[in-house]
Amino acid sequence: MTYLHQIDPIAFSIGPVDVHWYGVMYLLGFAAAWWLGNRRIAAGRLPGVNSEGFSDLLFYSMVGVVLGGRIGYILFYATGAFLENPAMLLRVWEGGMSFHGGLIGVLVACLWWSRKHRTHFFDTMDFVAPLVPLGLGFGRLGNFIGAELWGKHTDGSWGVVFPTSLPAELAQLSPQALRTMHASGALDAYARHPSQLYQAALEGVVLFVVLWMVSMRPRARYLVSGLFALLYGVFRFAVEFVRMPDNGIYLAWDWFTRGQLLSIPLVVLGVWLIWRSRSAPVLQPVLPASKENS
């Protein structure tokens, strides 16, 4: 069974401004991180940091993920398009974000915040890591709604038909005409893997459950960050086998993508951090002063 994707990427409009689902998903991701993070702060999981300090951390991380994600996308996948139209750098609401670039942006933001608050960098990262997956999941849902980053073709018996992936002569047809063709089975040959949903399940749900459960009690420094890097790298590398490369070009062997190349260092880093955690100290919770005195 195949599904014809005809979801409107615009969630709602305010006057002349269209608000895309992709942007709404980003807001949901940040809201989830704020709520979960404040729960952990109230439990003293980042000693010496109160809700105001966490709000600063979240703000810097938001700036880092947006700037890093967009710049990373331009550098890794769309340099040519950027040189032709530099204004595309600012059109974040249209999609086009790189996880690996966003990760670098978050690392820089967390490093700066950690130095400012005299907190060990990896204590900060171990705290932040479980807050990230839900945002990744929401982002992948935004990719699906926006009909971008779709997967490779299935055998036609199942999958999702994305109008944006159809040949030009079909993509220009009206929505009603496409529905009629789909009902007759004429579009089944164009069905693709909904790789965005695979990533939402793995990078969003599974990664969140694992990291949240592991970090429910204090763990050795580096462990949670290492699990995040390892699992994300493995999940991303695996899904790339059924996902079209972002720039449409394989780096080697007609299957090796840039996403897989960028994920290998994450896997190596994750293994190294987990190994290093075996002899690392455990950060014990310290309740905020207001709770201790109540």
Image (cartoon, rainbow, N blue to C red):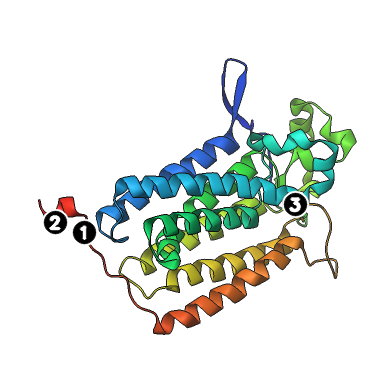
The residue wearing badge 2 is 292
Instruction: Farthest residue to the top: give it.
Output: 15
Residue type (three-letter) at the residue carrying disc 2: Glu
Q: How many marks?
A: 3
Q: Which numbered circle lies on residue 193?
A: none
SS assignment at label 1: loop
Q: CA distance from mark 2 to mark 3?
A: 48 Å
SS assignment at label 3: helix
Q: Residue at x 68, y 35 (%)?
A: 90
Q: CA distance from mark 3 to mark 1?
A: 43 Å
Rendering coords of residue 128 (x, y %):
43, 58
Rendering coords of residue 175 (x, y %):
74, 28
Q: Residue at x 39, y 80 (%)?
A: 280
Q: Residue at x 40, y 46 (%)?
A: 56
SS assignment at label 2: helix
- Crowding around mark 2 (Cα neighbors within 10 Å: few <14, some 14 to 19, many 20+) is few
Q: CA distance from mark 1 to mark 2?
A: 6 Å
Looking at marks 3 and 1 on the same chain, the residue that comes earlier in the sequence is marked by 3
Residue type (three-letter) at the residue carrying disc 3: Leu
Looking at marks 2 and 3 on the same chain, the residue that comes earlier in the sequence is marked by 3
Above or below for 285 versus 161: below
Above or below for 166 versus 261: above
The residue wearing badge 3 is 75
Q: Residue at x 72, y 57 (%)?
A: 243
Position of 290 compared to 16: left or right? left
Q: Which numbered circle lies on residue 287?
A: 1
Rendering coords of residue 91 (x, y %):
68, 34
